[in-house]
Image (cartoon, helix red, strand yellow):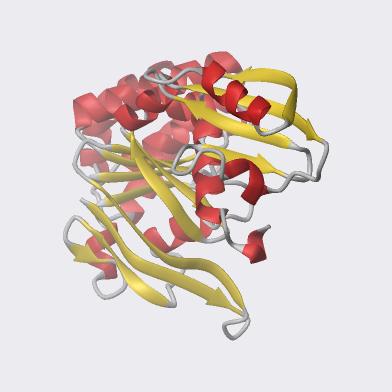
Amino acid sequence: MLEVTRVSKTYSLGRIRALDNVSLSAGAQEVLGLLGPNGAGKTTLIKIVAGLVAPSAGHVTLAGFNVQRQRYQALKHLGVVLEGARNLYWRLTVRDNLLYFGQIKGMPARLIARRMPDLLSLLQIEGLADRTVDSLSAGQKQRCAIAVAMVHEPQVLILDEPTNGLDLPSVDNLVEVLHALRSQRRMTILVSSHHMSFVQEVVDSVAFIDKGKLVGVLSASEVKSFSQREHYVLSLEGDEPLTPARVESLWPGMAAHFDPAHNTLSIEVKPSESLSTYLTVLLRAGIRVRSVERVDHNLESVYRQLLGSERKGKPDDA
């Protein structure tokens, strides 16, 4: 349904690379999360998928249509909510926003009016049709923005930072809405967010981006498998200076990463392993353990592990 193939984007005559050879995909009724720090390239990628920015290389396919070469046909299948619900006129009512933007997308007013009750009910804003957008709460504005993006019944929906400015009850409500969209409308959804717990609640898979590069893509089941492992951070000291080569060589092929700036060792202990094994090896090597901290797994810790694996051994990222 959505295919991003080897997409790159450069600015300033190629001196600034916002995206570097990114490929990912999402099928029908799949929710794909897009995670990464500010400046990672998430918004650039979203704008390229939405046809707002042209890639420097690669292409995007929506519902079988090339966004760059068949823009009109492709965008008929796409709904987009950019950060801040910018697809709304705040002085118009919810009803008038739907009528206005629906007609811009080529829909007759009578068809919009016929679809409107079900759409407003699905998004839990059925009692707000005659309220102006500027009188709504942040969560209500976000659901109104999604309604406008869906009025033409697209197959793919993009949400850019949909939880920004929302309180916890509004985030919970948005989770319910997205589950309903997937189950009742069979939509493919691409959602970018810094809200880790929100992403974990709604996605089927997660794409991690850093510095314009795709660090990795994990399914929800793979993320869950990470959570079943134990992750520890050990603070170390030794009679001689500690280096990554010295410490990590104690466990060749094992999931261990040493940070020389803080003298901390991050290790992942699988169910078949024991923390005491690591501690014994360190002791025999003359390395003392000052403290041990267990770290609970979530999407952020998974991202950091993937990022550490990606950067490990690259001097320019040290």
Nearest the viewer among 141 and 309 is 309
Q: How many marks?
A: 0
Q: Is residue 29 visible?
A: yes
Residue in view at x 33 percent, y 47 percent: 102
x and y percent of residue 157 in the render? 34, 43
Above or below, 121 against 145 in this view is above
- Residue 276 is situated, as x and y percent measured from the top left of the image, at 55, 16
- Return the residue found at the far top: 169
Quarter the C terminus occupies: bottom right
Residue 144: quadrant of the picture: top left
Q: Is residue 117 among the parts visible in the rendering?
A: no
Is residue 6 rendered to the left or right of residue 12? left
Residue ranking furthest to the left:
64
With respect to residue 196, does 57 lie above or below?
Answer: below
Q: Nearer the viewer, residue 10 or 285?
A: 285
> Is 71 situated left or right of 249 in this image?
left
Task: Tell me where residue 5 sits by quadrant.
Answer: bottom left
Residue beneath the point at 35% across and 39% down: 218
Q: Residue 43, relative to residue 173: is it above or below? A: below
**Residue shown at the point (28%, 29%) measured from the top left:** 181
Asked if residue 303 is positioned above or below residue 137 in the image, the reply reads below
Direction from residue 309 to residue 71 in the image, left or right: left
Residue pushed farthest bottom? 13
Please state the horizontal and vertical placement of residue 199, each as a whole percent of the image.
45, 30
- Residue 222 or 14: which is nearer the viewer? 222
Find residue 24 and report its horizontal and vertical position in percent: 32, 54
